[in-house]
Image (tube, rainbow, N blue to C red):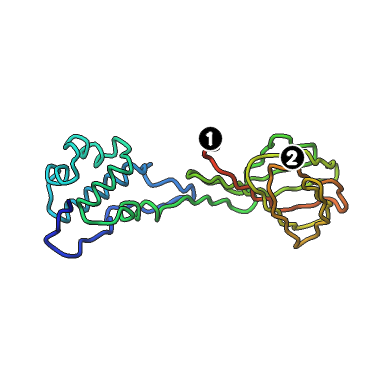
Amino acid sequence: MAIRPGRKDAKTADAAADELRTGSGAPAAGRTLEQALGQRIRAIRHELDLTVSDLAGAATISVGMLSKIENGLISPSLATLQAITAALNVPISSLFSVFEEKRDCSYVPAGQGVHIERRGTKVGHLYELLGHALGGEIAVEPYLITLSEEAVPYTGFRHAGVEFIYMLTGEVIYRHGDRTYHLRPGDSLLFDSAATHGPEELIVRPMTYLSIIVYSRLPPAV
């Protein structure tokens, strides 16, 4: 049963929300989703002049559980959040609004990407990671790939997700599965990266291309 507020329109903005001051994308002071939810619930409860006991009773949960939720000590189930928002007479999306405004942001200045060696990387294949998603269900890995003069063809790459390639310089015959594509500057290729793929013939070297790999962090459904 929802508790009707004394005022028809309660404020929904969290005045205490911290700004992201770095390019890391992490919430300021390491605030977790649980803490953000707890602070949001407490703020709405205060706007409605409700006690912890009032809200806990209306949501049919214990006072102790509500206290832990408001302090970010536990991760409430969706059913519990639905019961709380029903009691507060607000949409469940309102609990996530402030936290969602602080989505991941990864800033990499020019020339300062992380140089890495991916699994299966061959001599002359240089990978510069240009950013990374810090959380969420979907992982995104953008790379600037350089194939130097000593690079050799390799078509055995294979991994989960999808990959997008945008050719910047040079020319390459790129294989995906049983087909090949002649890529020149400005050409792009989007493909299922579970199939074997990679540069089959290096026509003009050195060459560079942007590669963006997207895959799910969640385990496959059974």
Residue 92 at x, y percent in the picture? 31, 53
- Residue that appears at 22% across and 36% down: 65
Using a 10 Å C-alpha cutoff, classify the residue at mark 1 as few (fewer than 14 neighbours), some (14 to 19) or many (20 or more): few
Q: Quadrant of residue 66?
A: top left
Relative horizontal placement of residue 111, taking residue 74 as reference (left or right): right
Relative horizontal placement of residue 130, taking residue 122 as reference (left or right): left
Q: Nearer the viewer, residue 138 or 21?
A: 138
Residue 189 at x, y percent in the picture? 72, 56
Relative horizontal placement of residue 161, taking residue 82 as reference (left or right): right
Amino acid beneath label 2: Phe
SS at mark 2 in the image:
loop
Using a 10 Å C-alpha cutoff, classify the residue at mark 2 as few (fewer than 14 neighbours), some (14 to 19) or many (20 or more): some
Residue 180 at x, y percent in the picture? 82, 51
Taking 83 as reference, is 219 above or below it? above
Q: Which residue is mark 1?
A: 222
- Distance from label 2 to label 1 (Cα)? 26 Å
SS at mark 1 in the image:
loop
Q: Which residue is mark 2?
A: 157
Q: Quadrant of residue 184?
A: bottom right
- Residue that appears at 16% across and 52% down: 46
Amino acid beneath label 1: Val
Taking 56 as reference, is 21 above or below it? below
Tell me which label, 2 or 1, sits earlier in the chain: 2
Residue furthest bottom in the image: 8
Relative horizontal placement of residue 71, taking residue 51 as reference (left or right): right
Residue furthest front in the image: 222
- Residue that appears at 55% across and 43% down: 216
